[in-house]
Amino acid sequence: MSKHILLIIGGGIAAYKSSELIRLIRKSGMTVRCVLTESGAQFVTPMTLAALSENEVHTTLWSLKDEAEMGHIQLSREADLVVVCPATANLLAKMAGGIADDLATTLLLATDTPVMAVPAMNVRMWTHAATQRNIKQLAEDGILVMQPDEGAMACGEFGPGRLPEPEAILAEITRHLENGTGAASLVGENELGSNPLDGQPAFAPDAHRPLRGKHVLITAGPTHEPIDPVRYIANRSSGRQGFAIAAAAAEAGAQVTLIAGPVHLTTPAGVMRVDVETAREMEKAVHEALPADVAIMVAAVADWRADSQSGQKIKKKGAAPAPLKLTENPDILAGLAQHQQRPGLLIGFAAETEKIAEHAKAKLAKKGCDWIVANDVSGDVMGGTDNSVHIMTRSGSEIWEKLPKPEVARRLVAKISEEIS
Ligand code: CTP
């Protein structure tokens, strides 16, 4: 029988994405009925939601007609899953506190159906101790809380708090309905505990998962090295290749820790993501994530950082620009090669514009890793979608001609699986 979703839409700018979510839910063969909060109605109209869901939209607790026809409590009980999207800071706080002062919160308190909340809010609101406390409480109460995405926000700030893409929300809904379980994109799931193999993502048991039981640690994206509060040193890395490898490793059954520099990418399903900004933060996160069976250092770590960081914006002074003194950043890959808990298979990436094989070979020795995956970055690889790579191992080398980054990822994961199985 087709599944039924009750979608509660809170009042935030991200409410407009609920229209796309309804379309995707319907397209996947499920039915959906919407409850719109008073503030949600400031962002989307009941008419839009009714047209897309092809169901009546419920907005108030005090509708005699609804009460006579089905009763409000019934609204949530007839659903297989209640999805709160966007879940604003205010809605989450009410849910955590058990407050029922409108239709949405009354339904949430009265339901015995599983509830998934998809938060979206300003970064400061998300990181505020009160919100984090509420999220923790909700996770403890058995509510599935999705991790918000990180990126530029409608309010002009940058950071975690963006609503995940509707495709990612649908994937989480489907996963829950199919497995009765969530993935690492849920708060409180798959967090690094004392045993890093805890929280292996749930996959269909019959599929071939060659990396099941393995912990794979991946770095991805650039690092940003601040100069003053408004400027930083960076590079063009998009993080796509590292994220694709994380997705492929999770698909292969691994528990994946993805340490990401500042990028605009959605966390792949089944991946535990740790966001960092600078090389030193990335190094610390890598060490904290150990032990790992395999480490793949894809990040384009900034080689240098500003020697000292100005607390205030550096002002122009006359004609001469302020000299920028640089200090070398730690080499995370080389450090890991020397680490007491060195992963069994340690893989580095190399960005090269010439003499690729020669430089890759030299890098293999210099960094003390097992393989180097060398990218030819003379074209538009950095930030682009395709990649040509040379794989240099201690026993030989191979070349993979121009391939989409997800395909490079799949082949690399297949090669890793072969190596460590
Ligand atoms: N790397 C790292 N920490 C650094 C610099 C690089 O862990 N501070 C890792 C990258 O993640 C990558 C590998 O080292 O896996 C090679 O990066 P690359 O930038 O090509 O090498 P560099 O050491 O910076 O060498 P060069 O710039 O001289 O080519």
Image: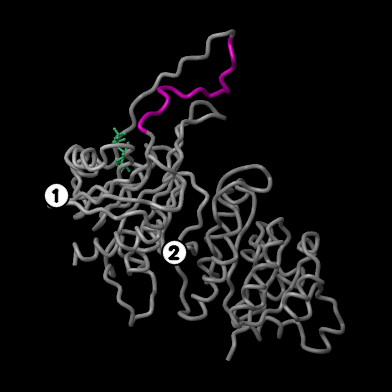
Q: Is residue 229 among the parts visible in the rendering?
A: yes
Depth order, front residue of 329/52: 52
Instruction: Check the picture and name the quadrant holding the N terminus.
Output: bottom right
Q: Quadrant of ligand 1?
A: top left
- Residue drawn at x 37%, y 42% as measured from the top left: 377
The residue to which callout 1 is attached is 394
Residue type at numbered disc 1: Arg
> Looking at numbered disc 2 in the image, what kind of residue is underneath it?
Ala
Main SS class of the magenta portion in the image: loop
State the colouring used for the structure image: one colour
Q: Residue at x 40, y 60 (%)?
A: 406
* Residue 68 image-quadrant placement: bottom right
Structural crowding at the residue carrying mark 1, measured as other residues with C-alpha within 10 Å and reported as few (<14), some (14–19) or many (≥20): few
Residue 58 located left or right of residue 416: right
Left/right of residue 335 with respect to residue 308 in the rendered view: left
The magenta segment: 303-317
Q: Is residue 192 visible?
A: no
Q: Is mark 2 within 8 Å of ligand 1?
A: no
- Of helix, strand and loop, which one carries label 1? loop
Q: Tell me if the residue at label 1 has its CB under 8 Å from ligand 1.
A: no
Residue occupied by mark 2? 184
Quarter residue 89 falls in = bottom right
336 vs 130, nearest the viewer? 336
The x, y position of residue 355, in whole percent, is 26, 38
| Sequence-wise first label, 1 or 2 | 2
Q: Position of residue 306 (x, y in %)?
A: 42, 25
Q: Residue 227 versus residue 110: which sits nearer the camera? A: 227
Q: Residue at x 64, y 49 (%)?
A: 122
How many marks do you count on the picture? 2
